[in-house]
């Protein structure tokens, strides 16, 4: 794994704000686990419900974690983001919160880590993405492999043509390799439709950081330039502008 490095753009690492890490000590352990597996940069992406519930608490806990991260005995960069849940019924409300800054984008860019219900229908997704794009935001579709209806017909091609990007969870490539979710993740990589990797890590007793096997799969099944882009290049170029 020494040859791999990764930016994890999807982690519930801010302590005590959503169903992710419970404490700052747990967050530090999760960051250490991630670093051992090759992660060098993490985007802290709590659910948007956390910002709607108590944004001051989220930012206070983020600042605390960032200060603690800077004192860790290994180098890990931490950036702020959010996993923004979109449903047709509250689309306008969520777009308003993005516009006013109550819900943050990824590191103050126009990119938004976008989550749908796993039962989302392709026409619902296309409609919401159209409205998000009209507002000038660029969706990064979180854990794309979880949305089976989006794999029908040419839906994902249409989503990409609308200027969106796709993220998959690294663990999906090793979790039940014969399963449908792993198959969809592998298909997306083979078709070079993936732009970002994430762990979607939550906490130590539920979905801990697990990217090592996924990174290995990426570099064994994809050409090096594309693998580098997915692992860290696209995030550096698009989400961490100089």
Image: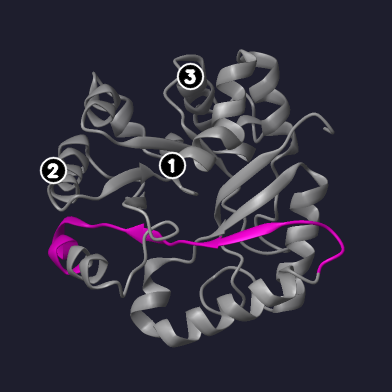
**Which residue corresponds to the image point at 55% horizontal and 20% vertical from the top-left?**
226
Residue at the spot of label 1? 238
Asked if marks 3 and 2 touch (Cβ < 8 Å), the reply is: no
Question: Is 89 a magenta residue?
Answer: yes
Label 2's element?
helix
Which quadrant holds the N terminus? top right
- Is residue 168 shown to the viewer in this render? no
Q: Is mark 1 on a helix, strand or loop?
A: helix
Q: In the rendered structure, which disc, 1 or 2, sits on the residue that comes first in sequence?
A: 2
Callout 3–callout 1 Cβ contact below 8 Å: no
For residue 30, which quarter of the picture? Answer: bottom right
What residue is shown with label 3?
A: 187
Q: Which residue range is magenta in the image?
A: 72-93
Mark 3 neighbour density, 10 Å: few (under 14) some (14–19) many (20 or more):
some
Residue 183 picture location, percent across and down: 52, 23
Residue 187 is situated, as x and y percent measured from the top left of the image, at: 48, 19
């Amino acid at each position: 794994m020494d040859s791999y490095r990764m930016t994890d753009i999807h982690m519930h690492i801010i302590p005590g704000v959503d169903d992710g890490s419970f404490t700052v000590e747990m967050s530090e352990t999760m960051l250490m686990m991630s670093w051992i597996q090759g992660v060098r940069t993490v985007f802290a992406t709590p659910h948007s419900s956390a910002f709607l519930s108590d944004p001051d608490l989220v930012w206070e806990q983020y600042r605390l974690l960032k200060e603690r991260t800077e004192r860790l005995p290994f180098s890990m960069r931490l950036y702020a983001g959010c996993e923004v849940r979109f449903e047709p019924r509250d689309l306008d409300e969520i777009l308003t919160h993005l516009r006013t800054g109550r819900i943050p984008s990824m590191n103050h860019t126009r990119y938004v880590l976008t989550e749908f219900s796993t039962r989302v229908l392709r026409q619902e997704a296309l409609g919401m993405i159209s409205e998000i794009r009209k507002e000038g935001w660029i969706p990064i579709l979180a854990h794309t492999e979880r949305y089976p209806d989006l794999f029908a017909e040419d839906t994902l091609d249409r989503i990409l043509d609308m200027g969106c990007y796709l993220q998959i969870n690294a663990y999906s490539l090793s979790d039940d390799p014969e399963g449908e979710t792993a198959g969809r993740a592998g298909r997306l990589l083979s078709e070079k439709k993936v732009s970002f990797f994430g762990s979607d890590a939550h906490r130590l007793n539920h979905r801990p950081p697990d990217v090592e096997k996924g990174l290995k799969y990426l570099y064994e099944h994809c050409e090096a330039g594309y693998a580098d882009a997915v692992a860290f290049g696209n995030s550096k170029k698009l989400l961490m502008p100089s």
